[in-house]
Each structure stands twice: as structure tokens, then as C-alpha cells.
Amino acid sequence: MRFTDLNLRPETVAALARRGITAPTPIQRAALPAALEGRDVLGLARTGTGKTLAFALPIAERLPARAARGRAPRALVLAPTRELALQVARELDRVAPHLVGVTVYGGTGYQAQARALAAGADYVVATPGRARDYQKRRVLRLEEVEIAVLDEADEMLKAGFEEEVEALLGATPGGRQTLLFSATLPVWARRLARRHLEDPVVANVLEDEAVAYREEVYRAPRDREEALSRLLFAKDPERAIVFVRTKAEAARLAEGLVARGHPARAVHGDLGQRDRERVLRDFRQGRARHLVATDVAARGLDVPEVDLVVHYQLPDQPEAYQHRSGRTARAGRSGTVAILAGGGEERRVRRLEAALRRRFERHQLPGDEAARTARLRRLVEAARAQPEAKKAQVRAIAEAWIKAGDVETLAGLLAERLLPDAPPAPPEGRPNRRRAVRR
């Protein structure tokens, strides 16, 4: 099947083709025919498999343009985080340029979003908490909603949005179309589907989805940060996301990686929206190649070119492992997932393998020489890529060193760049007892 087979508007097909999108993914093939007909759909697929287009295209195709000022939205998309809401809004803007959308989320000014809603919109993409707040104040009117979408329904439950989602859906007309997408189907999501979806088409591609990433387990020594540093140097990914459990760990580990020579940034719940956007912009543009993130903070990251995902510590649930790992191998790319596991964590790894019905590869951590070789390769590439004007300023010094055979200075310079001092380890028997706040 290709998008030309779905009776889409020619301009929609052309817009997709310009982005190199010509054939639907498995979840799109399973969900789009019914969704485009106006039927309710329960879609089950892993993160990063194209679920957004599976509901964005029906909104774009089924809603004609309107110009009335102050009009109530005809489509409502609920997402668990502001990052995912912004990602969905960008996709809708691309495939539905004839429609006006408003994105609603917390953590930013109230009045600007309220004014945008009052001016009128064809669709609203929102996080449930802020949407419910506007709806209670009658700033967000839902009586004309024709299409309601719940994206990442399982994550909305984990974020504690059950009550808000129920109230928002309850305020929409009974004859609307409802599209529910999720990577897993916990009890609440099943109840929600029974209450709010009418004779839905079940588009379940979880069993059919091949895992496009390699899964590797590395035995982590006591100094886990040093193990991670070696792994990052040896793998040398263009972009990597390292998952940790807490906000404090994200900040501490990012600082430690920078001290060891890695271009890393942290993203966690304590960052303000402006700082968060700056970090993600640096990550997308390559100024920061490694992102240290908590699970909540990484929801909805719109970064398809992630080569490596590292589980610095294993999450508690297989679902969280799958959500994390799904950050790599997106949009048809390959990728690698690495697990750092201490001696006492091997049993947890085996339980995870049993739950996923997959066997992970076991590997030894790269040695000092492998890490040093990879780092030297990166340094040489960066040196060769320096602008000619900058190289011209020091070329005379380089020529003088070569003429004098000054190996000692060159060795010292390389040691400075290749062998940075590691942060001091904590004293034996005195672990850091500072309590980290989970997020």
C-alpha cells in the first residue's frame, strides 16, 4: 500500500512525497482506512512507529477550512506532555495547512493561549491538565468537536490525567469520531475504550513490529559513569540519549560527562520551558551530542536521528523500557540500545527478556585503548574540519614544531585533549546519601 492508494487529497500526497514519505508504516496501514472513513480506531503500536500521521491525516482530510472568528475547534488531540503536544502540532501544521490550530500546555503563559483560543481554531492539541482548566473556564469550548484523539493513552494514565481525560471527553458530542493510540493497554485504557469508542476498529501491530534496534547488555563496574564514558567514546554516536531515574541524577551525570570530554546536556522536569527548548535545539543541531534525560522529560522528543539509547539504570517496568528504547531506530533508521547492568541486576535483565520474549546480546565494555582510539578519530575529524582562517593563525606554530621534531609538546597537547582528568571518586564506604527527587 502507498499513500496514493488511500484517496487522499493530491496536495496532501505531494506534501508527504516532498518529505520522502510515500508508503505508510504498519500502524498507518492498519488504522488509516477506517479512520479516514470516520470510524473509531483503537491503535496499538510502539513509540516512534508513525502513530501521529495515523490521526493527523484523518483530521486534515475530514475537516474543511473555515474562517469564522471565534469558532470552536472541531478536533481535539490530547497528549501527555508539552513536548509531544508540540510535536503533534508541527505534524498537523505540515499536513493540514488549510486549518488553524492552537497548542495548549502548562508551564507557560496563560493569556496568550487563551487569546488564541478566543480568536478561533479548527483543532486544538493540548495536554489534559491545561485543557481541562480552559474548558472549566469556558475558554476552550468542546461542543463542536467532531474528532477526538488520545495519543499515548498509557502515558496519560501514568502522568495522573485520568480524571481530566474523562471530563474532557465527556464534554464532547456523543457522535464524534474517537481515535485512541497507545503503546500498551493498561486497565484504564481498556475501560476508556469501552466507554468512549463505538464499535472501534482495532489496529494492533505490536506483534508484527520488528524491533529495528540491537539490544546490548554491558556489565557495569562500580564506577558506572566511567563505564558510560567508555561506551560513548567507543560507540561514537552522532546523537545518544542516556536515561536515568531522577532529575538530580540527570543533572549530575551530564556535568560528569562534560568533565570527561563529552558534549552532554541534561533535560529534566526542573528546567523551564525556554531552557528546555534551548537544550533540545542544541541536541537536534549537534552542539550537544548526548542528552541525559528522565523518562518524563523525554516524552515526545521530536528527534528521529538518535543512534544510541543507553539505559544507565533499568526502569521498573517493561513498558518504560520499550518507550525509552523506541527513541532510537525511528523513521526507518537502525539504532542500538545499550543496558548498563551491575552484577546484582542480571536477574532483572533476564526478567525483562522474558517479558519481551527477546534475548539481548552480551558484550564486554570497551577497554581504554578502544575508547582512546575512538576519541582520537573524533579529534582528528574535528581538527580537519576547522575553518581555513583559524588554521592559518596557528600554522606557523605547527610548522615550527614539525621542523624542531617537538614530539613532547605534541604529546602533551594530545594528552590534554584525549586524557582529561576524571572527576574524583567518592571515598570508599561513603556513598552519596543525598536523596534525589523522582520525576
Image (tube, rainbow, N blue to C red):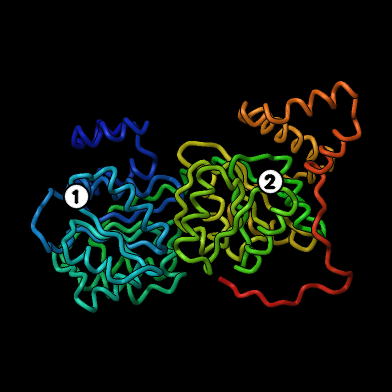
Q: Is residue 273 left or right of residue 193?
A: right
Q: Is residue 129 above or below residue 364?
A: below
When asked about the image quadrant of residue 386, the answer is top right
Q: Helix, strand, or loop for circle 2?
A: strand
Q: Nearer the viewer, mark 2 or mark 1?
A: 1
Q: Mark 2 highlights which residue? A: 216
**Looking at the image, can residue 210 be seen?**
no
| Of 188 and 260, the residue lying toward us | 260
Q: Residue 53: which numbered mark, if any?
A: none
- The alpha-carbon separation of the residues under discs 2 and 1 comes to 45 Å
Callout 2 touching callout 1 (CB < 8 Å): no
> Dot 1, how many residues are within 10 Å of its Cα: few (below 14), some (14-19), or many (20+)?
some
Where is 380 relative to 269, above or below?
above
In depth, the one of 314 and 65 nearer the eye is: 65
Q: In this view, does 247 lie to the left or right of 15?
A: right
For the point 60% across and 39% down, the residue is 238
Quadrant of the rendering where the N terminus is positioned: top left
Return the x and y of residue 343 as percentages of the image width and height: 80, 60
- The answer to which quarter of the image holds residue 292 is bottom right
Query: In the rendered structure, which amino acid carries the disc numbered 1?
Result: Leu
Q: In this view, does 3 lie to the left or right of 300?
A: left
**Three-letter amino acid code of the residue under disc 2:** Glu
Looking at the rendered structure, the number of numbered marks drawn on it comes to: 2
Q: Earlier in the sequence, mark 2 or mark 1?
A: 1
Q: Which residue is drawn at 28% across and 52% down?
A: 201
Residue at the top extreme of this rendering: 403
Q: Name the residue under label 1.
A: 99
Return the x and y of residue 33 as percentages of the image width and height: 25, 43
Q: Position of residue 358 (x, y in %)?
A: 62, 48
